[in-house]
Amino acid sequence: MLIEACEVVVTMDDAGTEIAGGSLLIENGAIAWVGTGAPPDADGAERIDGRGSVAIPGMVNTHHHLYQTVTRARALDQGLFGWLTELYPVWADVNEDWERAASRVGLAELALSGCSTTTDHHYVFPRGIEGLLEAEIDAARELGLRFHPCRGSMDLGQSAGGLPPDSVVQDTDAILAQTEETVRRYHDPEPGAMLRIAVAPCSPFSVTDRLMRESAELARRLGVRLHTHIAETTDEETYCIETFGRRPIELLEDQGWLGPEVWLAHCVHLDDKDVRRIAETGSGVAWCPSSNMRIGSGIAPARALLDAGATVGLGVDGSASNDVGDMLAEARQALLSARGVGGPGAMTIREALRVATRGGAACLGRDDIGSLEPGKRGDVALVGLDGLGFAGAEADPVAAILLCAPRAVRHLIVEGRQVVREGGLVNADEDDIAAEARRVGRRLVAEG
Ligand SMILES: [Zn+2]
């Protein structure tokens, strides 16, 4: 595939090279050449017209809960604990049909916003319900996205002092056994993998100390990554201090949960020592600015984390707390929130784009995606500069893709295959996807 004569190719290499009029050649799923003029050998290549588009690496979403997509616009004015308490009983009815419908919407939105790789963190496994992870894996395969589902878990119900109702928590041994089975069945460690599994107990207030420790041991034994929620709100900080006598990051470190194979959602409430320990241990952070502002959790210290050398990626978070899975919009939100608390020099536009691409890839431990360089996988988003939203933004087209109206990308290529073409999905019908999710959403409203 030859993507020809883009307005700019933003390579996101170490030097931040941007190539005006650049083209890209993709062979066998990987980038073979990037430059201007004609590539060495592109005979017979499928050609994509890059004129009027900015090419960026496919973005990497590091935190999501796809099942929440059919429970949008609920718990409208709640903070995290109130929001969870209102939604847990609704989520307790999740099933395969729901998971499939919600995943297809969430993944389609991400693809249309230029996201080529996404995680999901599914942690609600009601007793007797099968096929949940399978349904989202099927949806990612159908749409053509690179997927890192995290096998989440909760084993600390209300009767044991946790926040979730007992009906949505599982037995600790069953969780560990099912998680290992999921990794053995689906995880692909090879370069260019389209599917990888992570181990992901939910949060300090829904998981036992034993599950945290044994999950960390399991993931390290199986050679997979670890993910959890931490330091999201002041309520959680108070809970950790009162229950464990430690701040959230101290608790995690004690449980064996800092290290280069770990990435952590939120990290809003950190002190200087927390920031230092996250950076020193090589742990990653999934920064979720829209969700954190939507439920009023606060604004993560992204500048301090980046200055300390921490790995920072971007997450749209679940669609009950955002409530839109749009990576371009999230990168814009990240930029604005960093500047809102830190002033105009707190983050550059190129830094926000780097967090959304290279930063996310690093959180997932992938050096084969996140930049447009020979040898990397062929994951490219082309953002079209046409239409009202970009008219008048000729001075800096790269800056324009975050500063002006975020919108559907013109094309998205994943592993050298086209997933979005001319602003529409290639492999599925948007109207069908929306109709299926509306049917589930209406049923949930009717059931109260
Ligand atoms: Zn989350």
Image (cartoon, helix red, strand yellow):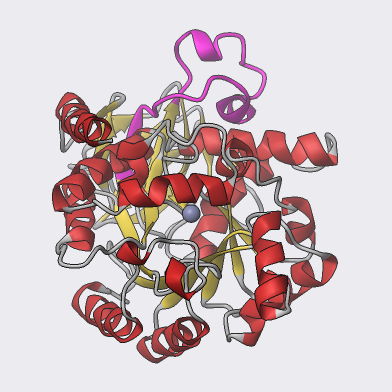
Indicate the position of residue 189 as horizontal and vertical percent values: 32, 77
Left or right: 70 as drawn, with respect to 98: right
Indicate the position of residue 50 as horizontal and vertical percent values: 39, 29
Q: Which quarter of the figure has residue 292?
A: top right
Magenta residue check for 403: yes
Q: Is residue 94 above or below residue 407?
A: below
Residue reaching furthest to the front: 159
Q: Is residue 115 above or below residue 153?
A: above
Left or right: 281 as drawn, with respect to 124: right
Q: Which quarter of the figure has residue 374?
A: bottom left
Indicate the position of residue 439 as horizontal and vertical percent values: 17, 30
**Residue at the (35%, 38%) spot, across then down:** 71
Image quadrant where one finds the N terminus: top left
**Residue at the (22%, 72%) spot, across then down:** 186
Left or right: 131 as drawn, with respect to 395: left
Residue 366 in sight in this render: no
Indicate the position of residue 405 as horizontal and vertical percent values: 54, 19
Task: Report the magenta residues as a range.
Answer: 384-413
Front-most of residues 185 and 266: 266
Q: Is residue 407 above or below residue 209?
A: above
The mark total stands at 0
